[in-house]
Image (spheres, rainbow, N blue to C red):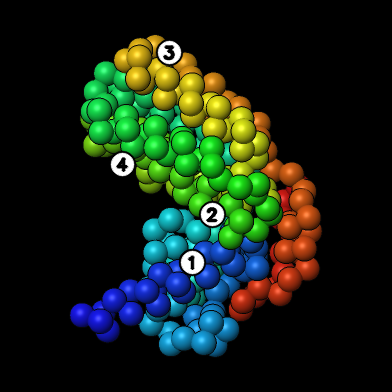
Amino acid sequence: MADGIRQDALTDRVYESVKAMVMDHEIAPGARVSIEGLARQLDVSATPVREALARLESERLVVKRANAGYRATDLLDSDALLDLFEMRLLLEPRAASLAAENASDDELRQLRSLVEEMHRQPDLGEKYSDYRRFAALDQEFHDVLARAAGRPLLADAVNRLHAHLHMLRLNSAPGSVDATVAEHQHILDALVQRNPDRAADAMARHLRSSRVRHRPQPSARGRAASRRVPTGGTPRRRPS
C-alpha cells in the first residue's frame, strides 16, 4: 500500500512539473516532447513521465502522434479562441439557467466556498506555479455549476473544453482576478435566488468579459519563452 501511495505521489509530482513546463512555455507550443529528456531532467524513470503525458493528452495540452511521440499542442489563434468562446456561450449560460432551477443546497455551498477561496488568493505572478490554485478554483467553479444543471452530457461537454488551460497559455496570468471573482459572485447570487434568466445573463456577461481579458497579447513570459530551448525541440515564437 505504501509503495502504491509513493508511486501515485511521484506521478502527481511529475505531472505537475511537466504541466508547468507546458503552461509556462518552457516546452514551447508545437515542440516535440522527449520522454527520455524529461526523465533525465526530473531525475525519474520514464514510467511516471509517460503517465503524466497521458494525463496531459486528456487535457489537450500535448498530443500523441503515431510513431513520433508527443508534442505540445499549438496555442489557440484568434479564430480558435473565438470558436472556444462561441461554444462556451452556447453551453454555459444554459447550464447556469438549469443550475438555478436544479442545484442542490450542497452544490450551492460548494460554489459559495469556491468563490470565497478565490477571494482569499494572494496576488498572482506570471508563472503557472503562482496562479495554479486560482486557475483550479476558477475551473472547478464552472465544472460544479455545470454538474448542478442536472444534465450529465452538458456537464461533460463543458468539462471537456478544458477552456481555462488553453486560455491561460495565451497570457501570463488569469487576467483581472477581482473582475473574475466579482463576476462569479454575480452568477452565484442569481443561482441562490433561483433566477434562471439572471443566472444565464450573468454567465454570458462573464464569458464575454473573459474573452476580452484573454485575448492573445505579447508578454514578458512569452518573449522569454521564445528564447528557451524546449525539451526535445527548437524554440518557436508565440503568435502575435
What residue sits 54% from the left and 42% below the top?
Answer: 120
Task: Please tell me the numbered disc located at residue 198.
Answer: 3
Which residue matches tag 4?
156
Among numbered discs 4 and 3, the one appearing first in the sequence: 4
Q: Secondary structure at mark 3?
A: helix
What residue sits 45% from the left and 72% below the top?
Answer: 13
Q: Is residue 71 left or right of residue 161?
A: right
Circle 4: residue type: Asp
- Neighbor class of circle 1 (other Cα within 10 Å; few <14, some 14-19, many 20+) is some
Which residue matches tag 2?
132
Among numbered discs 3 and 1, the one appearing first in the sequence: 1
Q: Is residue 202 above or below residue 163?
A: above
| Residues marked 1 and 2 touching at CB (< 8 Å) | yes
Say whether residue 170 is visible.
Answer: no
Q: Separation of disc 1 and disc 2 at Cα?
A: 10 Å
Q: Is residue 186 left or right of residue 9?
A: right
Which residue matches tag 1?
16
Among numbered discs 1 and 2, the one appearing first in the sequence: 1
Q: Is residue 44 above or below residue 94?
A: below
Q: Separation of disc 3 and disc 2 at Cα?
A: 30 Å
What residue sits 49% from the left and 21% below the top?
Answer: 186
Q: Separation of disc 4 and disc 3 at Cα?
A: 23 Å
Circle 2: residue type: Arg
Q: Secondary structure at mark 1?
A: helix
Q: Is residue 158 above or below residue 30?
A: above
Q: Residue 134 appears at what percent x and percent y?
A: 53, 47
Q: Nearer the viewer, mark 2 or mark 4?
A: 2
Circle 3: residue type: Arg
Say whether residue 85 is visible.
Answer: yes
Among numbered discs 2 and 4, the one appearing first in the sequence: 2
Q: Secondary structure at mark 4?
A: helix
- Neighbor class of circle 2 (other Cα within 10 Å; few <14, some 14-19, many 20+) is some
